[in-house]
Image: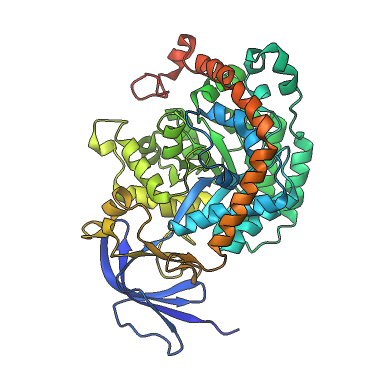
Amino acid sequence: MAETYKILRGGLLLDPATGTHAPRDILLKGTRIAEIGAPGMEAPEAAEVVDASDHLLMPGMINAHSHGHGSLGKGMGDRWTLEHLLHAGPWLNSGRDFEDMTLSAQLNAAEMLMKGCTAAYDLYFEFPASTIEGLNAVAEGYESVGLRSVIAPMMADLSLYQAIPGLLAAMPEEHRPRFEAIHLAPAEQLLAMSRAALSNWRFDREKTRIALAPTIPLHCTDTFLTGCRDLSEEFGVGLHMHLSESRTQVVTGLERYGMTLTAHLDKLGLLSDRFTAAHGVWLDDEDIARLADHGASVAHNAGSNLRLGNGIAPARKILKAGLNLGIGTDGSTSADDQNMFIAMRMASYASRIMSPDTNDWLSTPEVLHAATAGSAKALGFGDEIGTIAEGKQADIVFLDLNAVGLVPLNNAANQLVHAEDSTAVHHVMIGGEMVLKDRKLTRVNFADLRRKAEAANERLIARNADLRDFSIGLEQYVSQFCVGIACCPYHEHRFAGHAHDGSCRH
C-alpha cells in the first residue's frame, strides 16, 4: 500500500522548552512526521492539505495515571480521603458487565481527547478479579475512540481491611463478618490471568499496550508482587503502582516491613526502568534516589493529591535526582476530571507551596515536558510520542488562537499551563488521523455515548444502592481509624525525612 501524505500549513509551532512559537509547515508521511519546514515548503503533489492557520500546534499531552472505570463516578464523593475512596470502591464499581467497562473506557478516552490528551496509562479496576475479557473490553473502548493507551489491570490479593492492620477491629462488631468475608482473588489466579493476557495480546502495540498494576504494596502479598516482577521482566512490560500516596499507607508500611514501601519494593526487585510510581507524596530522599538509580518514573497527580488531602509530592527533588517525571489526572472519582491542562496547573501551583525559593518551583517548560515527553517515557513509548519532531508519531493538538485564554499570545508555555482550560482545543490528531475535528469526535458519536453513560449510571446506582448506604454509614469509622494512624504523635518522628519542614502535610 502506498504511503499517504498530509501537509499542515499555516500553523504556529510551539517550542515547549522556551514557550516561543513560529510559523511552520509540517509534512506527514503515514502516521509520522516526515519534515518540518518554513511556510510554503514543498510537499508531494498528492499530499492532503490541512489548514492549520489561526492555530497553535502543540504535542498531544499524555496522561501518566488515570482510572477509566472512574469516568462513570464523577461527583460521587466530596470530603473523601484515599481510604474513604477505597472503602467506597465496592459500591462505586460493582455490578458492571463488559459493556459497562467498554463504555467507561470510551467516556474516559472521549474526555481526554476533547481536552487535548492523546495517550493515557489506565489502571482499570474489575471486581473481584481482573479477567482477560475485562482487559479486552477496556482496550476496545480506547481503540474505538482513537486514543493511545497502556492498559494495566489494577490488581490486589488483599482487601483494604486486610491491608491496614486494626481497621477491621475498628468497625462495629456486628458488621465485621461482612468485611471479613471480602476476599479478592488469590495471587495464583491473578498471575495466571496476567500471563495468559500477556501471551495473547491481540491489539496493535503502536496504539494499545498492556502493563501490570499491582495496585498498592500493602494490598499485595510478596508472592504476588514478585510474580508481577517476573512477568514484567519476561514480557518486557511496565509495572505501575500507587506508591507512598497517603500518610496512612506510609505509616502502615513502616510498621509492616520495617522500612519504607519503596525500600521494600527495591528489596523484592520490582524497581526498574519499566516501573512507574504513582503519586509519591511521601517519598523520602532515599526513596527518590532508589527510583532514580533504577531509571524509574513518577506519575505526579497534584490535583488528586490535594483533592484527597494526601499532600504534595516533592517534584523538584524528583527532577534534581534525575528521576523521570510524568503528569497524570488520576481517576474521575478522585480528581473529578481528565483535564491535563488543569493537571499541569495544579503541578505548577503545588510546587510553589513547598518552598519560598522560586528556584524550587516548577517552571512552565518543565511542567509541559512532564505532561508530554516525561509521561511518554512513563508509558513506555520512549521518544515515539511526546514531541513534534521529524520521525515521531504525528500526535498533534490544534489550539484555536481565537480562544480568549490565548489572546494575546505572549509566552505560550506560561499561558498553556496557567491560563488554558482546554477551551482552545479545536482538533486533535493521533498518528496523522483527526480523531477530534472542529471539537467533535470523529470515531464515535458523543450524543450516543452520553445516552449510554446516563442509562448505565442509573442502572448501576440503583443496583448498588444498598451497598452504597451501608458503606457510607461506616465511613466515620474508616476516617477516625486512618486519621488516628496518620497523625499519631508516636509516628511523627518518622516523617522528618518526608516533609520538607519536618511537619505533617496531611
In this view, the residue in front, 238 or 343, is: 343
Q: Residue furthest top?
A: 490
Compare residues 237 and 100 and report the one nearer the observer: 100
Q: Residue furthest bottom?
A: 45
Residue 15: x and y in percent read 31, 61
Q: Is residue 347 left or right of residue 100?
A: left
* Residue 384 percent coordinates (x, y): 49, 62
Tell me what residue is drawn at x 71 percent, y 51 percent.
98
Camera sees residue 380: no
Image coordinates of residue 291 in percent, x first then y, are 49, 37
Q: Is residue 200 above or below residue 256?
A: below
For the point 58% across and 17% down, the residue is: 477
Q: Quadrant of the C terminus?
A: top left
Q: Is residue 316 left or right of residue 307?
A: left
Q: Position of residue 355 (x, y in %)?
A: 28, 30
**Residue 71 vertical placement versus 451 (above, below):** above
Q: Quadrant of the N terminus?
A: bottom right
User: Depth check: 334 or 262 in front?
Assistant: 334
Please give left or right for residue 489 compared with residue 97 in the image.
left
| Rendered position, 364 above or below 43 | above
Residue at image coords 53%, 29%? 82
* Residue 499 visible in image: yes
Image point (33%, 42%), residue name: 348
Q: What scheme was used to colour the molecule? A: rainbow
Q: How many marks?
A: 0
